[in-house]
Amino acid sequence: MNAAHNYTYGGLVFRSSVALPLMPHGCDPASVDVDVTFGPLPTPAAVCLRAKPHFQMYADGTAILRSPHGIRLLIDNGRSLRIEVPEGVDARLVQSWLIGPGLGLIMHQRGVPPLHACGVSRDGLAVAVAGDSGAGKSTTARALMQRGHDLIAEDQAIIDPARATLFPGVPDLRLWAVAAERFGERTEERARVGMHEDKFTISSSRERFDRTPRPLAALFVLSSEPADMPVSTRLRAGPAAHALHRHIYRQRLATFMGRGAEMFGWATAVAARVPVYAVRRPHDLSRLDELAAHIEQVVEQQR
């Protein structure tokens, strides 16, 4: 029998039968929240309530998600995650689907919608940067780390709206090659996220990872509209909730799962407790420090 590996993610303890790219957690097995296993998926006994070509949801609360590469994930009521991997599939793809949709749907089933965002912390406070895929969330986080911030979450930010707290998440940044080069990060082939992707896992971010839940000082939503210089506009409660709802991780799939009201309530609660800003900035990697300094200035001015 393989030894169990324990990890912490989003305020929960995960136990896995194999090593995962999360932060290790020494704990009593009784405190485990989610079990992660690998192997063939069992045939669901419950009735299928909703189905898409790549996703099925069952009456007992379980769901099965299938990747284009044939990887299948069974997510069971936020308590367990089982992964079935076809022979020959690249292990990096398996990791991406596990720490991406796998963890994301676990959190949705537990009633904690993950925000599509990166988070950093400094002086006991956290800041999150949200945006669409490819908007520059991880790149902005790395620019803030260059100025003394620590990473606290990559790609998915788990936020408790009642306490306005950001929990530690995935500890490895993933940067496009051009951004990694800008920061002098190594881009070895074994760190490539996928066989045909020009994106790399930056494991050096683990050296600057904050394992402590932090009060969330502000949320910045990156706009696709460029500007000559960084400009932030604080959003009122309604637009702020709308912006957060729009950037919930796997929002459409969670809506299909019947989590619409839950997500709206979460976004409204977070917007009521945390300042939310829409950010326009130059789309020029040479001006990343200017954007990071601007974010710091906005946070400092509101304190």
Image: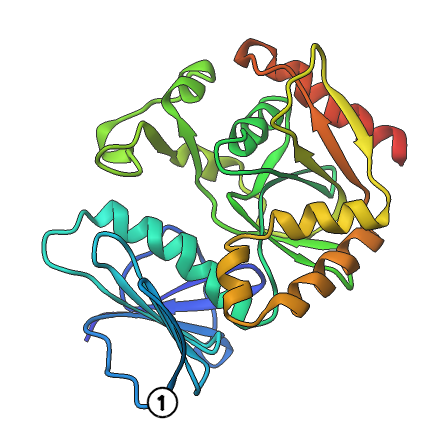
**Above or below — where is 146 with respect to 276?**
above
User: Going 53% across and 14% down the picture, which residue do you hit?
Assistant: 285
The quadrant the C terminus occupies is top right
Residue that appears at 40% across and 61% down? 102
Is residue 281 shown above or below 79? above
Colour setting: rainbow
Q: Residue at x 67, y 22 (%)?
A: 292
Residue placed under numbered mark 1 in the picture = 46
Give how far across and how far down residue 18 sits, in percent.
27, 62
Q: Which residue is more in the foreground, 25 or 196?
A: 196
Q: Quadrant of residue 41?
A: bottom left
Question: How far from the left and from the top, in percent, is residue 246?
Answer: 63, 49
Could you tell whether 290 is left or right of 140 in the image?
right
Position above or below: 298 against 253 = above
Q: Give whichever of 4, 236 is nearer the camera.
A: 236
Outermost residue toward the left in this view: 87
Q: Say which residue appears at 19% left-offset and 76% top-offset.
A: 1
Side of 186 relative to 281 (left or right): left
Residue 114: image quadrant is: bottom right
**x, y percent for residue 296:** 75, 26
Mark 1 closeness class: few <14, some 14–19, many ≥20 residues within 10 Å: few
> Horizontal and vertical percent for residue 50?
42, 75
* Quadrant housing residue 194: top left
Q: Amino acid at mark 1?
A: Ala
Q: Secondary structure at mark 1?
A: loop
Between 100 and 64, which is closer to the camera in this rendering? 64
Q: How many marks?
A: 1
